Image (cartoon, rainbow, N blue to C red):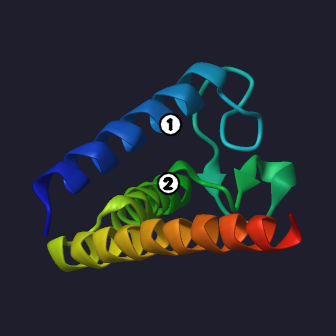
Amino acid sequence: MNVSRIINSIFIFIIIMGLIYAIQPSFIFKENGDLKKFGVNSEKGETIFHLGVISLVVAILSFWLVSVRDYSTSVTIEEMKVIEQLNDSLKELDKINDINKTNVLKQID
């Protein structure tokens, strides 16, 4: 496992959790700033969005996002060779296309 992936995930997690503590949304915190208890009875000040549940979800999502970003931006050496070959082939096709255009124009004249 890539260490930078873990470090980036932890960084994102800390930022999001810091924002949650700074904003203190009413579905997680009471009016006095205390955490609501986990439960389904909203009249007793309980919530299904307990900070423990939220932090678990944020941790999983932050690691997933970093993993997707790493996967989508990583290119292997073999893939780079294939890309170079494709670029070379495209350049050759452009040359052939230019030659064909020239020949067609000569035939028209």
* Disc 1: which residue: 16
Q: Secondary structure at mark 2?
A: helix
Image location of residue 72, percent across then percent down = 42, 65
Classed neighbour count for the residue bearing mark 1: other residues with Cα under 10 Å, few (<14), some (14–19), many (≥20): some
Q: Position of residue 1 (x, y in %)?
A: 13, 70
Question: Relative to residue 66, is residue 21 depicted above or below?
Answer: above
Query: Residue shown at 66%/35% (left/top)?
Result: 29
Residue 103, numbered label: none
- Residue at image point 59% right, 54% down: 50
Identify the residue shown where x is 55% and y is 66%: 94
Up-down relation of residue 109 to residue 82 (above or below): above
The amino acid on which the numbered mark 2 sits, given as a three-letter code, is Val
Residue 59 x %, y %: 41, 57
Instruction: Examine the rendered structure and indicate whether residue 28 appears above or below residue 92.
Output: above
Q: Nearer the viewer, residue 15 or 69?
A: 69
Q: Is residue 101 left or right of residue 57?
A: right
Left or right: 35, with 47 as reference point: left
- Indicate the secondary structure of the residue bearing disc 1: helix
Q: Which one is earlier in the sequence, the residue at label 1 or at label 2?
A: 1
Residue 80, image quadrant = bottom left
Rendering quarter of residue 79: bottom left
Closer-to-camera residue (104/97):
104
Identify residue type, mark 1. Ile
The residue at 36%/64% (across/down) is 67
Residue that label 2 marks: 58
**Do the CB atoms of the residues marked 1 and 2 lie less than 8 Å apart?**
yes
Q: Is residue 32 left or right of residue 57?
A: right
Q: Residues within 10 Å of mark 2 (few under 14, many from 20)?
A: some
Task: Give the Cα separation between the discs numbered 1 and 2.
Answer: 8 Å
